[in-house]
Amino acid sequence: MSCDRRGMNRRHFLQSLGAGVIAPTPRFTAAHPEATPADYTLRIQPVTLELTPKVHFKTTGYNGTAPGPILKVPEGKTVSIDVFNETDATDIVHWHGLEIPSNVDGSVEEGTPPVRAHGSARYTFVAKPSGTRWYHSHMPAGRNLNRATYTGQFGFFYIQPKNEPGDYDAEFFLAFKEWDPFWTTMVGTGDSLDVGYKRFSVNDRSLGFGEPIRVKRGQRIMLRMLNASATLFRRIGFAGHRFRVVALDGNAVASPQEVDLLELGPAERVDAQVTMDAPGIWILGAVDNHDREAGMGIVVEYAGQTGSPVWRAPSRKAWSYPVFGTNGQEQTADLTPIPLVFRKRFISSHWQDKWTVNGKEFPHTDPIEVSTGRRYRLIFDNQSDEAHPIHLHRHTFELLNVGGQPTRGVRKDVVTVAAKSQVEVELLADNPGPTLFHCHNQMHMDFGFMALFQYAQNPGS
Ligand SMILES: [Cu+2]
């Protein structure tokens, strides 16, 4: 993890001793005489959630809560985070959307050491780039629905830009999450296994049971939203209001637009401003009636207003990334193409499907080789009949073409590739080190949908 010596010190070493847990990795044994405590501590712990009053539900989270604490760090700051694993299973924390070295990124596939059961680790890195990032467990779950992103192990990691525009009166962090997963079969051909959920929430409360978002007429609010689902796409509306989308996956978009409806694949983020100009008591939540009524929503309450919260379905249901970009006519001839073909392999009914990248399942997928400083056109060719949230670690890519529509100016780290369609993105290979590439659907990544980008060794470097 932290090979950076700023992260190793005697006080931390002693703290580790005091807690009776020392990860047997070199960073803890090379103690320094000068001590500094970590900036943050995350404790992986069992948590009991009360999404609705007096109904208790057990999962795993950070620091006794789920979501975990919101980490707010200025861009460019060197941040140290101690992770104590107080569970009986190995885990790891991934810093999603940060451009940091492989050995602290939080992926064992890239070479980050895992955090053993009852062990600890310190992660030290420079927080960048600015924007709405997040952190979450990055273990395989396989058939165990009490692991990884099926649990409450997630939280916001907001990296404050050096010059925060600040043209809003209040900001709110909203994570959309399903709980209590169970195995079911997929509607459609084959009866393959799929995951269903019994409970739904925004942050740690179901609709109607948490504190409302309290606003005043005339305010402008900033909503920083995350789909923390392990497997599900999410459509979100805000009765009586429109979202002005200003950033996707934390990155400012070229053309901010007002929309009625947001769509977020697993791990995607949307930052949207809303002008509070419709006094009342409203619901912001899932467009899907079942999931919203089962808890995926939050009440927005104007000062001085009373009554029951009102839901109205968005009038227009379209969502498309290029709306937030430019026409994308810039020269792209110097990009080296890398085709990545995604296919499903049906195994049998009541069994998980397997997934292939260029014909092979992880860990047998071929490494994708890139060279430092070069630009690539990644061609995500989804030949399956399901949409996939495609994620690349440690890098931000720019959308070039979405289902035949050229664009520029939308930069992301997860992109939803619709069924039987293609998305092309530009990647600048500027962060050497093993880099994980995968579908962010936990079940898909666990059953083959993963590959590793490798940087070529440059002669003389
Ligand atoms: Cu997928």
Image (tube, rainbow, N blue to C red):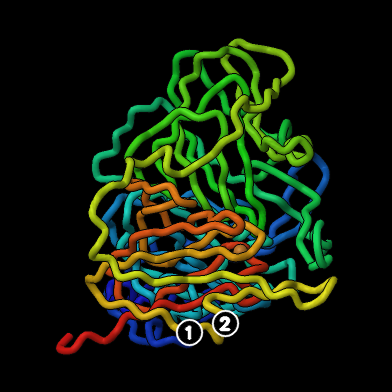
Tell me, for residue 434, which label it has, or none.
Answer: none
Q: Relative to 344, does residue 404 appear above or below in the rendering?
A: above
Residue 35 appears at what percent x and percent y?
A: 32, 71
Residue 168 appears at what percent x and percent y?
A: 38, 27
Precedes in sequence: disc 2 or disc 1 = 2
Residue 356 sits in which quadrant? bottom right
Q: Amino acid at mark 2?
A: Lys
Residue 261 sits in which quadrant? top right
Picture quarter with the N terminus: bottom left
Q: Residue at x 44, y 35 (%)?
A: 245
Tell me, for residue 366, which label it has, or none.
Answer: 1
Q: Is residue 422 left or right of residue 298?
A: left
Q: Looking at mark 2, is its residue's CB closer than 8 Å to ligand 1?
A: no
Q: Residue at x 71, y 21 (%)?
A: 309
Is the Cβ of the residue at disc 2 closer than 8 Å to that at disc 1?
yes
Q: Relative to 432, does residue 63 appear above or below in the rendering?
A: above
Q: Is residue 386 left or right of residue 331?
A: right
Residue 117 appears at what percent x and percent y?
A: 62, 79
Q: Is residue 386 left or right of residue 33?
A: right
Query: Could you say whether the residue bearing mark 2 is in a helix, strand or loop?
Result: loop
Q: Residue at x 57, y 42 (%)?
A: 263
Quadrant containing ligand 1 reads bottom right
